[in-house]
């Protein structure tokens, strides 16, 4: 019998200490993906891997606008911030052992629902353009590429370039308009 996707809930203080390791594990899924050149979490100088940025710290997670987790202990999480007055999906991570079972889609839907309930009109994010579980996945969930992001979203893309993310592969900003009734 297929295993059910864990329920999504608000993160508690006890979850925050676990999320940096979860994010680092999730980042290992990028290795060897189309659209990513030589990604290796924590790769050192002298090898042929470009290092990914370090995962968020417990303090950064504690300061987030909102965090949703799936499972106890968490096997996935969505970190939501605010950028240009929009909800911004700063991070969506799923542990490799839980990947490919629909958990990312459930977390994203929960994040979109939370943002709409908070009165946000849209959600933005920045991601790799060609990684199947990045931009193509978000496109299938209603996100569209923002061709020339300005304001805080543009500044965020500039920051990603400074961190070296664009050296790993093409990055894009995306936006999804939220339905309000």
Image (tube, rainbow, N blue to C red):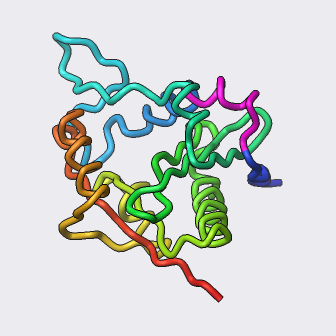
Residue 155 point in image, percent of width and height: 24, 50
What's the residue at 24%, 56% (across, down)?
A: 154
What's the residue at 76%, 50% (across, down)?
A: 9
User: Which of 75/48 is in front?
Assistant: 75
Residue 71 point in image, percent of width and height: 76, 42
In the image, residue 53 sits, relative to residue 125, either above or below, namely above
In the image, residue 69 sits, relative to residue 83, either above or below, namely above
In the image, residue 136 sits, relative to residue 66, either above or below, namely below
Tell me, yes or no, whether the highlighted magenta stretch contains residue 27.
no
User: Which of 94/172 is in front?
Assistant: 172
Say which quarter of the image contains residue 44.
top left
Left or right, residue 72 beside residue 56: right
Residue 83 point in image, percent of width and height: 41, 57
Boundaries of the magenta span: 11-20
Say which quarter of the image contains residue 144.
bottom left
All told, the count of numbered labels is: 0
Residue 122 point in image, percent of width and height: 47, 72
User: Quadrant where the C terminus lies?
Assistant: bottom right
Q: Which secondary structure class fits the magenta region best?
A: helix
What's the residue at 36%, 61% (across, down)?
A: 135
Looking at the image, the residue that sits furthest to the right is 1
């Amino acid at each position: 019998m297929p295993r059910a996707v864990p329920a999504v809930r608000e993160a508690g203080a006890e979850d925050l200490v676990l999320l940096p390791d979860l994010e680092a594990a999730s980042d290992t899924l990028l290795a060897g993906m189309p659209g990513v050149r030589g990604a290796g979490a924590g790769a050192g100088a002298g090898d042929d891997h470009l290092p990914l940025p370090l995962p968020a710290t417990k303090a950064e997670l504690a300061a987030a606008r909102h965090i949703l987790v799936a499972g106890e202990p968490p096997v996935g999480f969505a970190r939501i911030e605010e950028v240009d007055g929009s909800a911004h999906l700063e991070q969506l991570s799923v542990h490799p052992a839980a990947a490919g079972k629909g958990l990312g889609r459930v977390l994203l839907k929960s994040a979109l629902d939370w943002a709409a309930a908070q009165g946000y009109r849209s959600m933005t994010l920045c991601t790799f353009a060609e990684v199947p579980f990045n931009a193509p996945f978000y496109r299938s969930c209603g996100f569209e590429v923002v061709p020339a992001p300005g304001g805080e979203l543009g500044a965020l893309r500039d920051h990603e370039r400074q961190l070296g993310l664009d050296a790993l592969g093409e990055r894009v900003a995306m936006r999804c308009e939220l339905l309000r009734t």
